[in-house]
Image (tube, grey):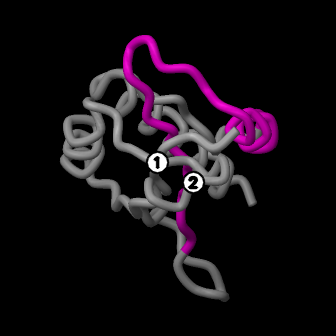
């Protein structure tokens, strides 16, 4: 079954909050095929011999009653255990989750 590609009503509000928190947002909403709506990135303070290190997290935006569909479950299963996938329904909760993951990534990189 093919689902119509569309933005959730809270997309603009969540995207704005993410950007205001200092993250960059790559909009992938029109891609479909289970790819999350956004790829959120932010440079980490560490710089390695290979250059700048980045935090990256996939964000699937859903309305309050929205449900994951088909291949979205596959993406979640792969990236959520790694802390690289969030289901976003509320701007504040989304930014809080991203900041927690970002801070954790800083800690992990500093231990290398």
- Name the residue that disc number 2 marks: 32
Spatial CA span between label 2 and label 1: 6 Å
- x, y (%) of residue 78? 80, 43
On screen, residue 73 above or below 106: above
Q: Nearer the viewer, residue 51 or 79?
A: 79
Q: Residue at x 48, y 62 (%)?
A: 44
On screen, residue 13 above or below 58: above
- Name the residue that disc number 1 marks: 5
Q: Residue at x 45, y 38 (%)?
A: 98
Q: Nearer the viewer, residue 36 or 111?
A: 36
Q: Residues within 10 Å of mark 2 (few under 14, many from 20)?
A: some
Q: Left or right of 5: which side holds 53?
A: right
- x, y (%) of residue 13? 20, 36
Q: Residue at x 66, y 47 (%)?
A: 34
75 within the magenta span: yes
**Where's the N terminus, which quadrant?**
top right
Q: Residue at x 53, y 61 (%)?
A: 31
- CB contact under 8 Å: marks 2 and 1: yes
Residue range in magenta is 53-81
Q: Could you tell which of marks 2 and 1 lies nearer the N-terminus?
A: 1
Q: Left or right of 41: which side holds 71?
A: right
SS at mark 2 in the image: loop
């Amino acid at each position: 079954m093919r689902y119509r590609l569309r933005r959730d009503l809270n997309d603009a509000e969540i995207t704005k909050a993410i950007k205001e928190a200092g993250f960059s947002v790559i909009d992938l909403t029109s891609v479909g095929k289970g790819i999350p709506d956004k790829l959120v990135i932010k440079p980490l303070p560490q710089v390695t011999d290979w250059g700048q290190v980045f935090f990256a997290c996939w964000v699937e935006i859903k309305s309050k009653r929205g449900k994951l569909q088909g291949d979205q479950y596959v993406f979640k299963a792969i990236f959520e255990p790694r802390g690289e996938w969030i289901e976003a329904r509320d701007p504040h909760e989304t930014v809080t989750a991203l900041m927690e993951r970002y801070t954790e990534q800083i800690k992990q990189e500093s231990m290398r």
